[in-house]
Amino acid sequence: MTQLQTNPQINTVGIDQISFATSKSYLDLAVLAERNGIDVAKYHYGLGQELMAVPAHHEDIVTLATDAASRVIGEGKRNKISTLIFATETGIDQSKAAGVYVHRLLGLREDCRVVEMKQACYSATAALQMACALVARHPKEAVLVIASDVARYELDTPAEATQGCGAVAMLITAEPRIAVVHPEVGNYTEDVMDFWRPNHSKTALVDGKFSTEMYMKALVNAWNYYQKNAGMAFSELDHFCYHLPFSRMGVKAHRKLCEHVQSGLSREQSDAQLAASLEYNRVIGNSYTASLYLSFASLLDHGKDLAGDNVAMLSYGSGCVAEFFAATIVDGYQQHLHSDIHERSLLERVALSYEEYVEYWNYPDPVDGEEVVIESHRHHKGPVLRSIRDHKREYAIN
Ligand code: HMG
C-alpha cells in the first residue's frame, strides 16, 4: 500500500517580492490633448491620467517582463523557482508562451514549468491564486508570476488616452516578506462584449461606457460573493487597490463600494483609502494584467507604515471576470521593496513628441517573414528585442 506523505505545515503564503518595469518613453497627455483639440483637464481630472507609457521598437511584453522579474529573483531565490506563470493579453504568439523567452533570459532552472494565461486584465489574479496553491503544496518552492501587457487602442478614439504598458513580477513563497494573500475570494463571471481583441486585430475593440458599467457591476457582485465566502468586513480593510484602466475608474469604483456597503465615509475619507495606489498608474497608463499589481506596488512605495494593514484587491478583466480578495502587509516589508529603482526608472524616461509617438505606434511587425533589425536596441541596456526574422523574435540582454 502506498504511504501518503503530508506536507510540512505552513502558516502563510503570499508575495515575497514585487517589482515593475515600464517603457523608457512616454507621451505627455497634454501633447495629445493639444493635438486632438481636447481640454487637458479631461485627461487630468476626467480620466485621472497625466502621462502614457509608449513602448519603443525594442520593447515588448517579454522585455518588460524580464526587466521587472530580474529584480525579484535575486538573493538566491532563482533556483527555488519551479513554475513561471505569465499573464498577458498582448500575446506575441498564438502557440508559444512568452514566458519561455523570459525563462531563458533569466537563466531559470530547466526543470521549471512555464505557461501563459489569458482572461483580459484578470488573468494575473488567477496566476497569483494558482501560484499560492502550488506553494501551499510545495512550500520550499517559489513561483514567479509575471503580468505584462501593452494596452493599445486606435488613434483618434476616446480610448486612445487610456493606452500604456508595463509589467509586474511577483515572487510567491511560503512565509512571504511583503504580503500574505488570504484564501477567501469573491468571483463574478458574465459573458459580455465590453472589450475584446479579435485575432486579426492589433488593437482592442471597446464599448467604452458599457465597459465602465460592467466594471461597477462586477465589483459589486465580486464583493457580495467575497462577503458570502467569509471575507473580511469593509471596516477591517485599511487600503483598496483596484484594476486601473485609468486612475479615475478606481476612485469611482471605490465610491460605489462605499455606497454599496453604507460605509458612512465622506468622499475625502473614501478617496484617502486608495490615494497612494494611484500614483504609478497616473503616469504609466493602463497595463492591463499588470494594472492591479502596479496599484499595489504604488501603495507599497507611497503608503506610510503599512505593516499589519489589510489591503483589499479588486481584479477586473473585460469579457468579464472579476475577483475580490485581500492581503495583509508583513512587518519589515519596507526592507524588501525596490522603491528607489522604480522612482528612478520613471524619472529617467524620455518624453516623445506626437510624431514620435505615432511612429512608435505604427512600427511594423512583419507578417511575411521579412527581416527587421531593430536599430534602437543598440542604444539600450537590459533586455531588448533585437530583430524579427523568418517569423521569429530574437531577444537578448544588452
Ligand atoms: P470618453 O468618451 O472620453 O468619456 O470615454 P467622457 O466624455 O464621458 O469623459 C470622461 C470623463 O471626463 C467624464 O467624467 C467627463 O465628465 C470628464 P465622468 O462623468 O465619467 O465622471 N470630463 C472632464 N473633466 C474635467 N474637465 C473637462 C472634462 N471633459 C470631460 N474639460 C472612456 C472615456 C473611459 C469610455 C474611454 O476612454 C474608453 O473607452 N477607454 C477604454 C475602455 C476602458 O478603459 N474601460 C474601463 C472599464 S473596462 C476595464 O477596466 C478593462 C480594461 O482594462 C481591459 C481588460 O480587461 O483587458 C479596459
Image (cartoon, rainbow, N blue to C red):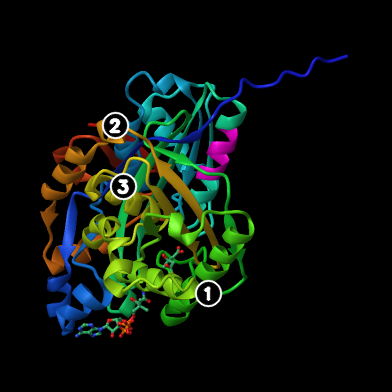
Is residue 188 shown to the viewer in this render? yes
Residue linked to disc 3: 297
Residue under the point 36% across and 63% down:
244
Q: Residue at x 24, y 62 (%)?
A: 282
The residue under label 1 is 217
Name the image quarter holding the C terminus.
top left
Question: Measured from the top left, where is residue 368 in percent x and y?
Answer: 42, 54
Q: Residues within 10 Å of mark 3 (few under 14, many from 20)?
A: many
Magenta span of residues:
128-134
Q: Amino acid at mark 3?
A: Ala
SS of the residue under disc 2: helix
The answer to if 37 sits in the magenta stretch is no
- Label 3, secondary structure: give it: helix
Above or below, 46 relative to 318:
below
Return the disc, 3 or 1, that comes first in the chain's sequence. 1
Instruction: Give the residue number, with chain letter if any, for mark 2.
Output: 336
Q: CA distance from mark 2 to mark 1?
A: 36 Å
